[in-house]
Amino acid sequence: MEGTACLNRLATGKSPAARWADTATRCGTDQGPYMQHFWDHLNHLHTTAFTMLEIGVYRGGSIATWKEIFPKAKIYALDINPECAQYADRSRVKITIGSQADPVALEEWVKQVTDPIDLIIDDGSHMMEHLKTSFRHLFPKLRSGGIYVVEDLGTCYMPEYGGELRNPSTMIELLKSLVDNINQHWSGIGNTFGIDHLHFYPNICFIYKK
């Protein structure tokens, strides 16, 4: 269930995070289990006008979810499937067709954004090289204090996604290196990217920019 059918149908007697999870379920996305973490990190944006980017549109469920949860947000989404263009909303949602593995496509996508970027969510292909390409290109585009979210990190251990336990080429190992570098402040990727802090939960990570 998507779009207007999702709007303003919040369950009563539940915590805000549980209501966000209900919204995700009604809107047809599998992000419900993450909503407690999204609430913890993003509830300050709930009624705020801000700009967010999301990689991965699929059947439009997450777009419908964010439209309800963040009623004042401008949403820019990217997907490689041309059929995803149907989920655009002239007033609030712009869909770009392109690959998250292509730095040129990423740059063209970001050029459309005229306001500071507060939030980026990667729920795209979950392929290791794609995750890393997107992060390296897009994280620097965030405003100071902005948040980058990587979902479904379990794929970092799945060979079909290029994953493997303790393989240095995976996204999870890149994220671990960020932990090293924000503590070893004199070297490496932490200084380059301006990482402030990270929060890991099962299958998802929130990375904050200084």
Image (tube, grey):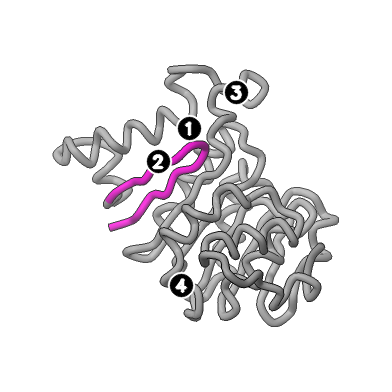
Mark number displayed over residue 162 = 3
Q: Nearer the viewer, mark 4 or mark 1?
A: 4
Residue at (71% x, 53% y) in the render = 29
From which residue to which does the magenta span run?
A: 197-210
Would you call the spot at circle 2 few (<14 residues within 10 Å), some (14-19), or many (20 or more)? few
Asked which quadrant contains residue 157, the reply is top right
Q: Is residue 6 above or below residue 128?
A: below
Of the residues shown, which amino acid type is indicated by label 2? Phe
129 to the left or right of 196: right
Report the Cα–Cα distance between label 4 and label 3.
34 Å
CB under 8 Å between discs 4 and 2: no
In terms of sequence position, does the residue under pointer 4 or pointer 1 come before the other?
Answer: 4
Element assignment for label 1: helix
Of the residues shown, which amino acid type is indicated by label 4? Leu
* Residue for badge 4: 45
Q: Main secondary structure of the magenta part?
A: strand
Report the Cα–Cα distance between label 3 and label 2.
21 Å
* Residue for badge 1: 171
Q: Quadrant of the C terminus?
A: bottom left
Tell me, yes or no, whether the highlighted magenta stretch contains residue 205. yes
In terms of sequence position, does the residue under pointer 2 or pointer 1 come before the other?
Answer: 1
* Residue for badge 2: 200
Element assignment for label 4: helix
Asked which quadrant contains residue 24, the reply is bottom right
In terms of sequence position, does the residue under pointer 1 or pointer 3 come before the other?
Answer: 3
In terms of sequence position, does the residue under pointer 4 or pointer 2 come before the other?
Answer: 4
Report the Cα–Cα distance between label 2 and label 1.
13 Å
Q: Nearer the viewer, mark 4 or mark 3?
A: 4
